[in-house]
Image: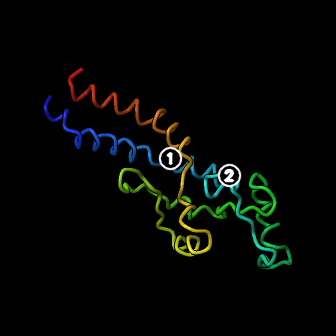
Amino acid sequence: MKPLLNQQHLKNLVNIEIINDEDKLVDIKKQQYIVGDIFSNGKKAKYSKKSRVVEGGSELYRDFKNKLNPKAGLGNVDLILGGSFINSFFIEEKGKGYIFAATDSKANDLIGRYGEEIFNLKQKSFDEFLNKYVTSNFRSVLKKQLGQ
């Protein structure tokens, strides 16, 4: 039972559960993007009035994106077109918490344009994720290690 009392061991068990359910956490962030909350704080980023023209037509990118995803609201940035950016997200442990990172080639450009805040997640959303997935799984793993 002594290894279970080790704080680092318990932390590692929690980390494993968070990583195991990483796809669910990314889905939560994707839902925030879909409604145009790219910073996870309710503040909306807008396409500029000089939005580029969509290839093959005269439609502004802002209007093109609104037709694809009206949930974001007219002119609001949602950072989702084909999904390669959000689908490249993964969780990294940083300090005492976790952050999203992305492997997509557009990541640095998007960070340059909108800031690293695009990787933020609402604390309430993270807490709900912990309660719904991590806590119950952690309890199960802990009971198994205790032989219960």
Above or below residue 64? Residue 39 is above
Occupied quadrant, residue 94: bottom left
Local secondary structure at mark 2: loop
- Residue 140 position within the rendered picture, expressed as x and y whole percent measured from the top left: 33, 28
Model colouring:
rainbow
Q: Tell me what residue is drawn at x 23 percent, y 39 percent.
A: 7
Look at mark 2 in the image and give the residue it sits on: 42
Above or below residue 64? Residue 100 is above
Occupied quadrant, residue 91: bottom left
Q: Quadrant of the C terminus?
A: top left
Extreme residue toward the left, this view: 2
Disc 2 packing (10 Å; few <14; some 14–19; many ≥20): few
Mark 1 vs mark 2, foreground winner is 2
Look at mark 1 in the image and give the residue it sits on: 25
User: Hey, what amino acid is under mark 1?
Assistant: Leu
- Residue 67 position within the rendered picture, expressed as x and y whole percent measured from the top left: 81, 60
